[in-house]
Every structure is written in C-alpha cells, then in structure tokens.
C-alpha cells in the first residue's frame, strides 16, 4: 500500500476515526493491527518476518536487563547476529553469491552454490532491523529500561507511518510516546494535514513527474546526448530529495494527526558547504544512527590512532552506509566516495580554515557550497545507476559533452512545457521551504499565509500531479 494511493487515504481515514473513538487501552492494539495490515498488503509473509524480529528482540532485551553487565554480551551478540543474518540473507545473499561465483569462475574453479534462489527484499527490513539493534544496544548500555508491554514495543517497531522508509526512530523518542495517551487536538490535526499535503506535493508533482525524464536516461544512457544527460543528473538530486523528504513529510504528518512526533529527516541538505555537513542535513535518522552506534564506538576503540582513527572510522561507516542502501557495487562506490571526501575534509580542516581567512569568508563559503552540491550530484550517478556499466556510461556522456541532432526530440519526449513546469514547482518548493520552513516548524503562524499556501499547493497538486502511483525510491532499501 503506497502513501500516494487512494487506498492509503481511505485506510488512514479509518484508522484515525477508530483511533480517537476507542478507549485509550485499545489504541495500541488498533495501531498494531493497522500497521501489520498495512505492511502485509505488500506480501503476507513479510508480517511473519517482522513479528519474528520483534519478538526475539523484545525478549532478549528483557533477558539482558536481568543479567549482570559482563554476562549480557553473549545474549545481545546472539540476537543482533540473528537480526543481521535475516537482513543479510534477504538483502545481500545474492550479491555475495554472484560475486563469489565470478571469482571462482575467473580462477576456473567450480562453485557449489547455484544461483537458483529468488529472494525478494522485504520492504522496510533495513529500517526496522536498525531500530531493533539500537533498542537492544540502549538496553545493553543501560540507557533505558526494557519495554514491559510487548504490544507497545511491537507498535514501536511496526508503526505504519515510518515502517517502510523511516525515519529510523530511537526508542527514547517514539516508544516513550506510545506509553502515553494522545488527546484529540484540532491544531495538531490541521498541522499534520498541512504537512501531508506538502509531502504529497513534493512526491506527486515533482518527484514522480521528474521520473518520466530521468528513468529512460538511466535505463539506456547511450541513447542520450551529454546535454540531456547532464540535466537529468541535476534533476535527479531534486527528484530523490522530493521523493524521500516527501515520504518523510507524509509520515510525520500522519504521526502528528495520531498524536505522535517522529524525528525530522532533512534540514536543507543542498545548502551544505561540505560533504560532512551534507550528511548532517540529509537522512538525519540514518546519519545519527551510524554516528551513535558505529562511528563513535570505532573512534573510541581506536582512540590511540589519533587522526587516523577518524579516517578509519569514516571509511568503515560510509562503506556500510553504501551497503545499507543496497547490495550493488554502485552503492559501495557511492559510500566510498563519501568516505574519501569526508576523510579529506577531516584531514585538511586547519588548512581550509587558513584558505578561508586569506580570501573573503563569504566567497569561500559560496565556492564550497557549489563544489559540495556538484560532488553530491556526481555521486548520485552511482546511487541511481542500475549497474556500474550504466554509471560509467553516464559519466562518459558527461565527459564527451556533446550536442547531437536528436537533442530537441529528446526534450520533446518529456515535453518542454512539462520541463518548465517542473522548474517552476521546484522553485516554488525551494522558496517556501527556505522562507517559511514548513518541514521544520509546521509552516507559519500567520493564518492568511497558511490559507494561501494550502490553496496554492492543493491547486498545483490537482493540476500538475502525476496520478499514476509510483513507488518511493527508498522502498528499495
């Protein structure tokens, strides 16, 4: 069930009406049933996998909380191993199996495991697996007490607004709220609806319409000119932002209507002045998870290495960040590119400060912003490409920046009018988010501005929306 579908609108309306009609003691049961129904619409077997991960992590947390600190390790290691093994099997088995087969074939050796397993990646598995691991580690390090009610914990893991593509919620936020009784609040409902409307606008008007131009280029890059390819590379940065942040806006808005606040996931990433800052503004819940549960522990363990510990931790973190996004060499390359540049930024911090002091700080910051944006656009080539061959073909098109005789027909396939509309809607989105910050503060306290904004957004959605439901990009991860 997609957020951008009529079935979800009907489903969500029913959930909200029932939620505020039922006595408080039944509300978490309703949320649990609704979340599993929502998830199992993709495939019923997914619900069993989610339930298994939930149950084993719930009881392991209770078990380790009763053990002495030195006795806990074997239990938490076993539980995390089981959860990661499930994730590995469904997400990475075919990737490693194919690569091992290629290595064996290169050395003319027989490989015993045939490529006959048809493994379909369960939607959202990367997100809820990271949530169970963070919960277990918080219990292990005594940052919180284990949740006593299994229904409440199960809702925390399966809460349908954030289940499929995050944000990755820490138990110290959402799980705490699930132990309270949210009241019906008109202002919160209006704010939530406005946030959902903004998310639908970014997804349906911008992201889905851009996919009509971008998808053909990445499928057959050799068929397109360098000019057209370059434009699609720039536009993909806005497509993925609108697609993913649009999902997050809908998730946050839906949660807010139900009385819960989930974490923000974006903070104007394209105004970053370096790549490290970009990752402090992009997919914040993943970045914070990696920082808290991977990067910081590595630094602590390798503190004797001094600055080299930063580089080592950065490479490990972003290698796994790339793999988290998908089992392809394109994602590994994407992660390594981030690690290389951020390592450079860490090692040259003092030199770059000196450069900034020698020229105008404002000029230096503006140059840094432009360079950072272009690096992100370049690295997104590997993020979007189906394979390394297509990624290098895209890059080849950009290097040999050619105008061919078919360039006008390339634009006509998409439609010059549609392209102009996309640029106008992106400009509208950028203006609204930069001036009024609807993604961060629920928009604006001025009722007239709110009314005008809502009317414009709804009108643009109805007139320009691409109403052929497209899957969210991050559902693939």
Image (tube, rainbow, N blue to C red):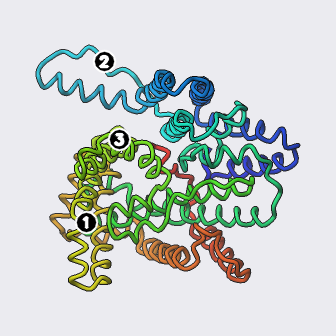
Quarter of the picture containing the N terminus is top right
Instruction: First in sequence, mark 1 or 3: give its number.
Output: 3
Within 10 angstroms of label 3, few (less than 14), some, or many (20 or more) residues? Answer: many
Viewer-nearest residue: 365 or 431? 365
Q: Quadrant of the C terminus?
A: top left
User: x%, y% of residue 272?
Assistant: 38, 69
Say above or below: 344 vs 294.
below
Viewer-side residue, 254 vs 149: 149
Question: Which of labels 3 and 2 is toward the front?
Answer: 3
Q: Earlier in the sequence, mark 2 or mark 1?
A: 2
In the rendered image, is residue 149 in sight?
A: yes
Residue that numbered label 3 is attached to: 323
- Pointer 1 residue: 349
Determine the secondary structure under disc 2: loop
Measure the C-alpha gap from mark 2 to mark 1. 49 Å
The label nearer to you, 1 versus 3, is 1
Q: Which residue: 32% across, 62% down? A: 275
- Location of residue 444 in the rendering, given as x and y in whole percent from the top left corner: 66, 76
Residue at disc 1, secondary structure: helix
Tell me which label, 3 or 2, sits earlier in the chain.
2
Q: Is residue 271 above or below residue 56?
A: below
Pointer 2: what residue?
114
Q: Distance from label 1 to label 3 (Cα)?
A: 28 Å
Task: Please name the residue shown 84% across and 50% down the image.
Answer: 20
Q: Is residue 271 above or below residue 299?
A: below
- Element carrying mark 3: helix
Q: Is residue 28 left or right of residue 159?
A: right
Q: Mark 2, mark 1: which one is toward the viewer? A: 1
Near-viewer residue (224 or 203):
203
At 52% from the left and 57% from the top, the residue drawn is 265
């Amino acid at each position: 069930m997609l957020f951008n579908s009529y079935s979800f609108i009907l489903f969500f309306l029913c959930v909200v009406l029932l939620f505020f009609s039922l006595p408080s003691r039944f509300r978490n049961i309703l949320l649990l049933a609704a979340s599993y129904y929502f998830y199992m619409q993709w495939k019923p077997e997914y619900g069993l996998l989610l339930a298994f991960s939930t149950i084993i992590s719930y009881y392991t947390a209770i078990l380790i909380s009763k053990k002495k600190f030195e006795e806990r390790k074997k239990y938490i290691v076993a539980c995390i191993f089981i959860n990661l093994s499930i994730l590995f099997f469904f997400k990475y088995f075919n990737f490693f199996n194919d690569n091992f087969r290629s290595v064996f074939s290169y050395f003319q050796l027989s490989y015993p495991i045939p490529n006959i397993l048809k493994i379909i990646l369960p939607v959202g598995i990367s997100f809820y697996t990271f949530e169970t691991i963070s919960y277990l580690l918080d219990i292990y390090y005594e940052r919180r007490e284990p949740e006593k009610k299994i229904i409440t914990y199960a809702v925390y893991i399966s809460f349908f607004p954030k289940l499929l593509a995050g944000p990755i919620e820490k138990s110290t936020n959402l799980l705490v709220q699930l132990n309270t009784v949210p009241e019906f609040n008109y202002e919160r409902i209006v704010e939530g609806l406005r946030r959902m409307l903004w998310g639908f606008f970014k997804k349906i008007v911008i992201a889905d319409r851009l996919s009509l131009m971008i998808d053909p280029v990445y499928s057959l890059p050799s068929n397109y000119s360098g000019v057209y390819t370059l434009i699609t590379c720039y536009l993909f940065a806005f497509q993925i932002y609108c697609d993913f942040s649009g999902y997050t806006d809908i998730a946050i808005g839906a949660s807010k209507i139900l009385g819960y606040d989930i974490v923000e996931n974006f903070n104007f990433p394209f105004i970053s002045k370096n790549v490290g800052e970009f990752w402090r503004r992009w997919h914040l819940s993943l970045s914070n998870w990696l920082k808290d549960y991977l990067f910081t522990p590595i630094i602590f363990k390798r503190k004797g290495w001094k600055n080299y510990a930063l580089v080592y931790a950065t490479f490990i973190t972003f290698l796994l960040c790339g793999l988290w996004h998908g089992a392809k060499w394109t994602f590994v390359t994407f992660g390594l590119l981030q690690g290389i540049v951020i390592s450079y930024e860490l090692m040259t911090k003092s030199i770059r400060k000196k450069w900034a002091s020698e020229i105008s700080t404002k000029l230096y910051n503006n140059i840094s912003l432009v360079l950072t944006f272009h690096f992100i656009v370049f690295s997104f080539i590997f993020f979007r490409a189906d394979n390394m061959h297509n990624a290098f073909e895209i890059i080849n098109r950009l290097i040999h920046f050619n105008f061919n005789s078919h360039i006008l027909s390339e634009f006509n396939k998409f439609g010059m009018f549609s392209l102009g509309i996309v640029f106008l809607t992106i400009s509208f989105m950028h203006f609204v988010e930069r001036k009024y910050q609807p993604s961060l503060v629920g928009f604006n306290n001025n009722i007239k501005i709110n009314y005008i904004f809502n009317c414009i957004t709804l009108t643009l959605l109805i007139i320009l929306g691409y109403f052929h439901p497209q899957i969210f990009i991050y559902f693939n991860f």
